[in-house]
Amino acid sequence: MLSAVKKFGNSAGILIPKPLLAEIGAKAGDSVELKVEGGRLVIEPVIRPARAGWAEDSQRLAREQDDGLVWPEFGNSEDETLTW
């Protein structure tokens, strides 16, 4: 499949067709690793572990006192009749 290198400001880019991205398990907006191997440009998706960075983000939110409930606690009308 042919493509062209196009100028984007001070950089250059290549449009990658969706089927090729799907073949490596990536989609628009994903992070990718670029490297050169044997004179070829290799593009690999960056696989991050689930919940990576959550601990740091929660600590930052607490430090900034931005850790309040987004949805306030609210009960259901039947809560008082429930037996556990």
Image (cartoon, rainbow, N blue to C red):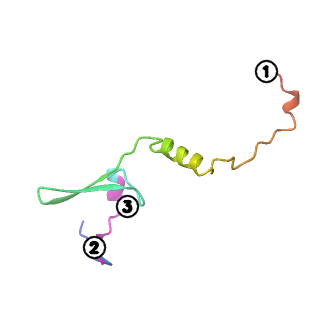
Q: Position of residue 51 (x, y in %)?
A: 48, 41
Q: Residue furthest left?
A: 38
Q: What secondary structure is marked by label 3? A: helix
Q: Is residue 30 above or below residue 49?
A: below
The residue located at (33%, 55%) in the rendering is 32
Find residue 30 and report its horizontal and vertical position in percent.
40, 56
Quadrant where the N terminus sits is: bottom left
Secondary structure of residue under mark 1 = loop
Of the image marks 3 and 1, the number of the one nearer the N terminus: 3
Check residue 84 in the rendering and tell me which mark sits there, or answer none.
1
Contact flag, marks 1 and 2 (Cβ < 8 Å): no
Above or below for 43 versus 54: below
Q: Amino acid at mark 3?
A: Lys
Extreme residue in the top direction: 84
Q: Give the number of the disc on residue 18.
A: 3
Assess disc 1: are there few (<14), some (14-19) or many (≥20) residues with their C-alpha within 10 Å of its C-alpha: few
Q: Which sits in the foreground, 71 or 40?
A: 71
User: Residue at position x 11%, y 56% from top?
Assistant: 38
Disc on the earlier residue, 2 or 3: 2
Q: CA distance from mark 3 to mark 1?
A: 51 Å
| Residue 42, image x, y percentages | 22, 56
Give the mark count. 3
Name the residue carrying label 2.
Answer: 12
In magenta stretch: residue 23: no
The amino acid type, in three-letter code, at marker 2 is Ala
Of tags 2 and 3, which is closer to the observer? Answer: 2
Instruction: Indicate the quadrant containing the C terminus: top left, top right, bottom left or bottom right.
Output: top right
Residue 35: percent from the left, percent from the top? 21, 56
Please state which of residues 23 and 79 is positioned toward the viewer in this rendering.
79
Question: Which portion, as a residue range, is magenta?
Answer: 10-22
